[in-house]
Image: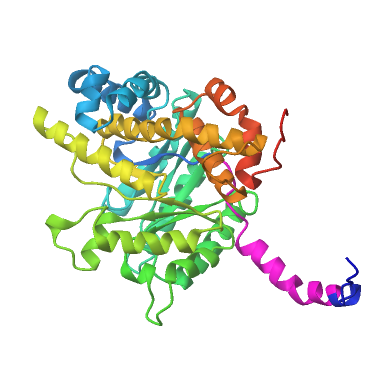
């Protein structure tokens, strides 16, 4: 072309030197999603009701409710709003899921679900919960993800919450290591200083109990306006994430505490209230790129009582689950075993509906085949992500993935992180 660049190696080296601290900070603050499995829900259960057979008992109750109120795909479509063809595609998968893994993530609750108790009673409950968790693991009845929700770091409850966690760890670690998916949920976190204190408490507990540094991870519940927007006008939730020294793995939205705190009347408190959407949008922005996962909250309309009441609650729950998934909240709370059929039906329906188009687009992207959608690395990552999430929860299987997308789970995991190189025609 006859043209030459005017900037030489020294200029480019100076640019690299100038931006090296920024590069390092961005890599540290925004490492990206870890690409590991995220549970589709968290079941909150009061500590005094947890025992070693909790998960299989919830599964049996959910299966009985499904048999009673949606005994076939047509009935499931009617009570969930799923298209009949989608209901037919997910029905057997849902029943198998409820039999094999009805709870993906279990939180033994010492906070609102458990309530204030005398200290000796909560001490005993903490030790018993640890024994029940150990028994569930030995009986192969422990969900893949599990943890505690302790009382908040507010002045009136902080000592009680830390003591419960300390006692639980002591009792559990006396016989066995922590489960791989163990996490601690801290409610009503409102200040960066509280998160910094949590980091220090985790460090002290690790030292005291002989745990490796960094082993204790936690989730933060976003339940107050102060958790979202601080007095100085700053987005508090972003500060909370970055004050956690990498220990925060999740942000959970607290539907009813948050909506009450902003003055929403009881009859209008909901996961889909505009105030909820505003808070969750800020949570989403704050967590983007950090590797911190998001969870939507719960509905307090439970599927109990008359047949009509159960079906109405199922329709609501299925719609809310679907709504959360469409808004990239891939996890939510469940509070009752009869919510499990609609949790998995709505979740499986979402991923089954996405499967054909996502697999075809990803295959075309990798093979450099032109089509009606111009995909690029960012959209390829999104396509890989939806397929991987469907695979993780059981909505999709590896045979389908191979047949439709030409990928196995390992290849999909690589794409989910980087979108990878295209295969080129004929590869």
Q: Which of 204 and 112 is in front in this view?
A: 112
Q: Nearer the viewer, residue 275 or 2?
A: 2
What residue span does the magenta drawing correspond to?
A: 12-36
Placement of 71 over or under 331, stated as above or below = above
Placement of 346 over or under 287, stated as above or below = above
Could you tell whether 24 is left or right of 105 in the image?
A: right
Instruction: Tell me if residue 102 is in the magenta stretch.
Output: no
Quarter of the figure with the C terminus: top right
Quarter of image, res 57? top left
Name the colour scheme: rainbow
* Residue drawn at 36 percent across, 57 percent down: 151
Quarter of image, res 83? top left
Rendering coords of residue 234 (x, y %): 43, 77
Rendering coords of residue 53 (x, y %): 36, 26
* Residue drawn at 31 percent across, 56 percent down: 254
Quarter of image, res 186? bottom left
Quarter of the figure with the N terminus: bottom right
* Residue drawn at 85 percent across, 73 percent down: 13
Rendering coords of residue 295 (x, y %): 40, 50
Evaluate whether residue 273 shows in this view. yes
Query: How many numbered circles are shown?
Result: 0
Evaluate whether residue 178 shows in this view. no
* Residue drawn at 35 percent across, 50 percent down: 296
């Amino acid at each position: 072309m006859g043209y030459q660049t005017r900037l030489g190696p020294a200029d480019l080296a100076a640019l690299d030197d100038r931006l090296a601290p920024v590069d390092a900070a961005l890599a540290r603050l925004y490492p990206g999603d870890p690409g590991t499995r995220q549970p589709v829900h968290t079941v909150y259960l009061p500590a005094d009701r947890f025992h070693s057979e909790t998960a299989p008992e919830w599964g049996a109750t959910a299966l009985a409710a499904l048999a009673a109120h949606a005994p076939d795909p047509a009935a499931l479509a009617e009570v969930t709003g799923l298209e009949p063809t989608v209901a037919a595609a997910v029905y057997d998968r849902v029943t198998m899921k409820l039999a094999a893994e009805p709870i993906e993530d279990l939180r033994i609750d010492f906070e609102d679900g458990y309530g204030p108790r005398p200290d000796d009673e909560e001490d005993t409950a903490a030790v018993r919960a640890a024994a029940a968790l150990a028994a569930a693991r030995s009986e192969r009845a422990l969900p893949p993800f599990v943890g505690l929700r302790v009382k908040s770091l507010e002045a009136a409850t902080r000592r009680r919450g830390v003591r419960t966690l300390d006692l639980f760890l002591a009792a559990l670690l006396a016989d066995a290591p922590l489960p791989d998916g163990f996490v601690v949920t801290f409610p009503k976190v409102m200040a960066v200083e509280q998160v910094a204190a949590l980091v220090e408490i985790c460090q002290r507990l690790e030292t005291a109990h002989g745990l490796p540094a960094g082993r204790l991870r936690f989730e933060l519940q976003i339940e107050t306006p102060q958790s979202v927007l601080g007095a100085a006008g700053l987005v508090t939730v972003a500060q909370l994430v970055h004050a956690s020294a990498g220990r925060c793995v999740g942000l959970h939205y607290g539907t009813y505490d948050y909506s009450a705190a902003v003055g929403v009347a009881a009859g209008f408190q909901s996961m889909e209230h505009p105030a909820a959407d505003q808070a969750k949008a800020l949570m989403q922005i704050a967590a983007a790129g950090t590797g911190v996962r998001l969870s939507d909250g719960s509905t307090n309309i439970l599927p109990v009582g008359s047949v009509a009441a159960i079906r109405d609650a199922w329709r609501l729950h299925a719609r809310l689950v679907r709504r959360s998934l469409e808004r990239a909240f891939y996890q939510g709370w469940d509070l009752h075993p009869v919510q499990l059929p609609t949790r998995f039906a709505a979740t499986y329906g979402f991923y089954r509906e996405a499967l054909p188009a996502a697999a075809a687009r990803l295959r075309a992207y990798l093979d450099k085949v032109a089509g009606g959608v111009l995909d690029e690395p960012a959209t390829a990552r999104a396509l890989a992500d939806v397929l991987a999430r469907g695979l993780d929860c059981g909505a999709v299987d590896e045979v389908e993935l191979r047949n439709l997308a030409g990928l196995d789970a390992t290849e999909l995991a690589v794409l989910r992180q980087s979108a990878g190189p295209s295969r080129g025609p004929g590869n």
